[in-house]
Amino acid sequence: MPGNVTADVAIVGAGFTGLWAAYYLLQADPSLKVVLLEREFAGFGASGRNGGWASSIFPVSLARVEQLYSHRAALDLQAAMNDTVSEIGRVVDAEGIDCEYARDGFVSLARSEAQWARAKATVAGAEKFGTRGQWELLDSAAAQEKINATDVLGGIYTEHCALLHPDKLVRGLAGWVEEHGAVIYEDTAVDEIGKGIVWTEHGSVTASVVIRATEAFTPEFPAYRRNVAPLYSLVVATAPLPHGLREDLGLDGRTAFNDMRNLRIYAHPTSDGRLLFGGRGAPYHFGSKVDSSFDVDEKIHDKIIDTMHEFFPALRDVPITHRWGGPLGVPRDWFPSVGYDQNNKTAWAGPYVGDGVATSNLAGRILRNLILDKRDNLNSLPVVNHRSPRWEIEPFRWFGVNAGLRAAATADLEERVTGKPSTVSALLEKLTGAH
């Protein structure tokens, strides 16, 4: 940034949230002066290095949404998430953004008796709740036809998921907003966010509204230190697989997949024939610290590779060509939010608990509506102006978050031993609402 500037809208963070907000604001009113401020470069955070799923998954169960708001609100939220998968496809097609968008859905495999019981309960629960058709129950043959992993007893499938190349989407959106008048100032660290003003090392931005779109980096601002806990998700990618091997393993399409374990994993075949495989399990770092040295964790990456080989023993001799990772943001109640405080000239969106590729698009449209006073049914969704409680002070935050991660791993061990859905997992869901 060259010095002090003024804008109609200043956005702190040039990831998906900031770029989607800029996109929809400029679409609605091309005369707006929009400035995005980014400490590194557009897409540096989770937006540029995630698992590439644009899914309708919301990190909090619909039952918890109903408990906090209403049954109708929960149904509306799920419908909006489903529509968001389509909306992203519509935008990238309309704007000519080649981000390898492919909507082949998502299958969650059941690879143990406990997981199979949970799969059946998930479909039955969705039907009872009123989201008929959200999930389709697959028997073993149908599930293996989609993904031919080991020990598959069945699974559940939803059409409401697409794969994309996140960095290509970031670059496409950044190019579009710049072409339509927005300015992205990279290498510009924000020191403080105030009422209609942002201070940086190069000067200040005075704006009618400031959008905080900082996801896992939010705790680096003292005023928001306890709003978000950064957790690391780590990923590997193989060398391109021979076509025959991809066919044998059901990896010749673009279907996203995981299994129904409690400590989440995620995987998909890439457009160039690789297998991308990621997962959670990396520790939370004391004081909500975020550092590039945490992006590669040999121990956790090796566990992810072992899990991939457990799914597909035929891949044991296939080279791993890439390892990476990064932080994602988690609010205390696991509930993403979007809001606008007109009196303080501030707006915000996130964090998304690892489900932000799609949810950030929904957030961008809601921010447009709130800032431009545009009437829309999206404005009544339960994410709007939701207020999460703050995380505990240290060392209680460090102890609690890491205990939760360990409990999820323990729940998987419990299920392997008992063959039944974990009581530890049920307790975790009851405490957090996460699923």
Image (tube, rainbow, N blue to C red):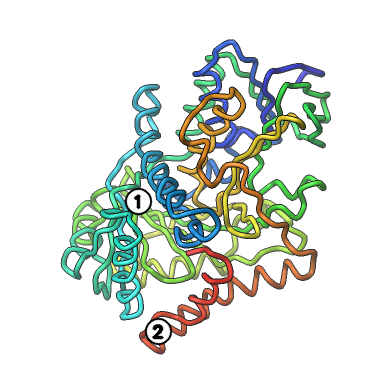
Q: Point out the tag, 1 or 2, that comes first from the N-terminus.
A: 1
Residue 360 drawn at (x, y percent): 52, 40
Which of 79/96 is in front? 79
Q: Secondary structure at mark 1?
A: loop
Q: Left or right: 279 with respect to 331?
A: left
Is residue 264 placed above or below 350 in the rendered structure? Answer: below
Q: Left or right: 235 with respect to 246?
A: right
Inter-mark Cα distance, 1 to 2 = 30 Å
- Quarter residue 432 falls in: bottom right
Local crowd size for mark 2, using a 10 Å CA cut-off: few (<14), some (14–19), many (≥20): some
Asked if marks 1 and 2 touch (Cβ < 8 Å), the reply is no
User: Which residue is under mark 1?
Assistant: 274
User: Which residue is under mark 2?
Assistant: 416
Q: Secondary structure at mark 2?
A: helix
Residue that extends furthest to the top in the rendered view of this protein: 31
Q: Left or right: 146 with respect to 292?
A: left
Is residue 358 placed above or below 315 in the rendered structure? Answer: above
> What's the residue at 46%, 57% (across, down)?
236
Residue type beneath disc 2: Arg
Residue type beneath disc 1: Arg
Which of 72/15 is in front? 72
Residue 328 drawn at (x, y percent): 59, 52
